[in-house]
Image (cartoon, grey):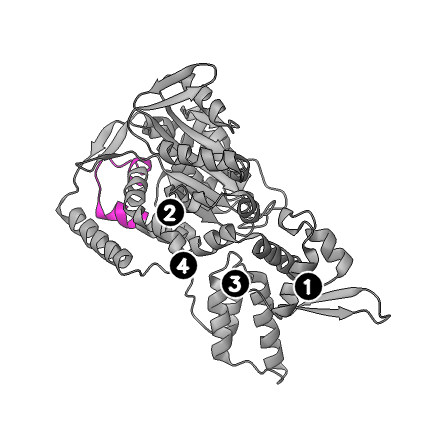
Amino acid sequence: MEGGSYLARRIKAELTAIERGEGKTTRATLVEWLQRYEKTFEVAELAELQKALSVEGTQEPEFHSLVPKGWFKELMTWTNQTESPSSFYFLSAACMIGGLIGRRICIDRGTYRIFPALSGLILSPAGRGRRSTACDLVIYELGRPAGLNVIADSFTYEAMGEALTEMEKPEALIYVGELSVLLGKGSYGESIIPKLTDLIGKTSTFEWRTVKRGLVEFKEPCLNMLATSAPDWLAANIPAVAFGGGFLSRFLVAAQAGPERTVVWGDALDEKVKGRLIAELKEMRGRFGKLGKPGAAAMRWYTDWYVEHSARLDKGEVVDEKLIPYMARKHDHLLRLTTVLTVAGGDEKLELTVDRMEQALGLLNWYEGKLPLAYSSMALGPIGQAQHAIVRALERSGGMLDHSTLHKKVYRLAPLAGQFYEVMRSLIEMEVVQETTGMTGRGKTYILKRGLE
């Protein structure tokens, strides 16, 4: 798939050529390119390009318009002087609230119970998305003062077990600043993934063996996870079992290429608003209850959606097979997020309503719009990762770099070790990159011709 910045430049170049009477690309092709641009992480120039092509936006709704009034909306307003995307703040806060509520509120499904302990994965290129800024602010500035139990920097099975034994109840949010460190490829990464898969969202008693304490039994657990990573780092380290074993299907994924806004020098965040947000979180933590079978209207809505969603899965309408495990769990994600919105919205009665389920579904659908690209970037093999890294480096440098400069920009990537020439040859043969020789006949220069399909 072409990078967003490459597609934007390509469209602009063709529009300029058309203005000069030199354009050879049809409007239909430009609109097709624009639609492909909408599906990338990088859509900063979308409105400008839509206007230039006189097309109405087909992109998903503005994220802010999907956030319901109440605590979440106030959080969005409070953080609008930071560069982190609103979608990052929302997902980290939804996981935080789910962890804060723990087992105090549940959804009774008849044969099993669901607790609103959402797990989230936030992806952005290293240094670009401000993902740690969003997560740290939500977890440490809001969650912990409100009573959230956090397990952080415990990147081994042993350390997590020790942290749990020190808690009054096994209810906590596991916060992992760089998931690839925890899930590194190799025997350890492959062995810890099944344990975490079983642990996240587990509601029955489980046992944990540590070197110091031996076998420890944890009753009535409620654990969820918030993790962040750069897609290319995760791709280089995550074992394949994370896809097939259901680990990633337990996460809502937020992915964005860069900051939502440019803030050169922001003002300090309002302490009064912060205090109000924390006070409301404490009130949420103090609520207890059970959401049972929805009322007639809500039950009709949920039944219609569930039947249609199940039919899509049965007919194989989920194009990317890596998304099937997630889609198979979407009904539970929907109920968890609905519960979080109900509690955060201060609804007097704890019940599943049509309005709250529609709000939750709108947010899930928005996040899912980024899933195919996020999953594909994580699932690339070493050569694929290297190809994308080279194309991104060329894009960011105006489409052309000499051999030495390009090599310096990408040689630190593990997948490229000893394979730079092999990867460049593959890109040249694919006609993605053109190789030229300097006027003196010495030195090579690489020119980007198109993006990766």
Residue range in magenta is: 341-360
**SS under mark 3:** loop
* Label 4 CA crowd tier, 10 Å (few <14, some 14–19, many 20+): few
Single out the mark in the foreground, 1 or 2. 1
**SS under mark 4:** loop
Single out the mark in the foreground, 4 or 1. 1
Which mark is first along the chain, 3 or 2? Answer: 3
Which mark is first along the chain, 1 or 4? Answer: 4
Q: Disc 2 versus disc 4: distance between alpha carbons?
A: 14 Å
- Which residue is identified by label 3? 1
Single out the mark in the foreground, 3 or 4. 3
Question: Which one is nearer the viewer's eye here, 77 or 230?
Answer: 230
Residue at horizontal 35 percent and vertical 22 percent from the top: 207
* 353 part of magenta stretch: yes
Counting from the top left corner in percent of width and height, residue 325 is at 35, 48
- Which residue is identified by label 2? 67
Which mark is first along the chain, 4 or 2? Answer: 4
- Which residue is identified by label 1? 398
Counting from the top left corner in percent of width and height, residue 62 is at 42, 55
Q: Disc 1 versus disc 2: distance between alpha carbons?
A: 37 Å
Q: Disc 3 versus disc 4: distance between alpha carbons?
A: 19 Å
Query: Residues at badges 2 and 3 in contact (C-beta under 8 Å)?
Result: no
Counting from the top left corner in percent of width and height, residue 221 is at 33, 25
Of the numbered discs in the image, which one, if any, rests on residue 60? 4
Q: Amino acid at mark 4?
A: Glu
Residue 224 figure quarter: top left
Q: Amino acid at mark 2?
A: Val
- Horizontally, residue 183 falls left or right of residue 201, namely right
Q: Disc 4 versus disc 1: distance between alpha carbons?
A: 29 Å
Q: Amino acid at mark 3?
A: Met
Query: Residues at badges 1 and 2 in contact (C-beta under 8 Å)?
Result: no
Single out the mark in the foreground, 2 or 3. 3
